[in-house]
Image (cartoon, rainbow, N blue to C red):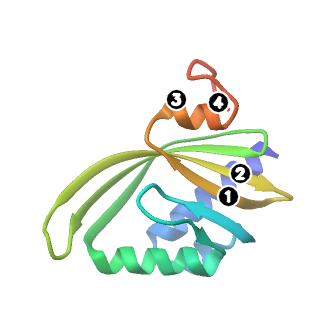
Amino acid sequence: MSQENVEAVRLSIAAYQRGEWEEATAYLAPEVVWEVGQELPARGPAAVREMWTRWNDEWERLDMICEEITGAGDKVFVAMRYHARGRLSGVAIDQRVFEVHTFSDGECVSKVDFETRTQALEAMGLSNQTRVD
């Protein structure tokens, strides 16, 4: 199941980057909880899309680069780099975030962002030295 989950996340990222947000959220369960560090969790695919719309309004430019994506059991690990520039402030960011997507019955039921690789791997039940495939 791990490879199917990895492919679902990979396809979602590609759809997001093309601006096809309905397609990007197609792998999400209706009750998904989407947690990013800087705000309250979004609950459900529509709330995730609303969050993305707000981000799109706030950032002049927001680029995502998927640096690594691997799976283990019902979880998918993603190392994502964000490059952005604030629309009003002009503030630039370059940030790496480590995500853990958890699946149940072929759908993503949660996505949580972590500041460090170690935190994300621990959330997956793995150590930093464990190879994730």
Say which residue label 4 marks.
Answer: 132
| Badge 2 density bin: few <14, some 14–19, many ≥20, Cα 10 Å | many
Going from N to C along the chain, the mark reached first, 4 or 3, is 3
Task: Return the residue nearer the eye: 101 or 68.
Answer: 101
Q: Is residue 124 above or below residue 1?
A: above
Q: CA distance from mark 1 to mark 3?
A: 19 Å
Give residue 102's mark. Answer: 2
x then y, percent, for residue 56: 35, 77
Q: The residue tagged with tag 1: helix, strand or loop?
A: strand
Q: Amino acid at mark 3?
A: Thr
Residue located 43% across and 46% down the image? 97
Assess whether mark 1 and mark 2 are in contact (beta carbons under 8 angstroms): yes
Going from N to C along the chain, the mark reached first, 3 or 2, is 2
Q: CA distance from mark 4 to mark 1?
A: 19 Å
Say which residue label 3 marks.
Answer: 118
Give residue 110's mark. Answer: 1
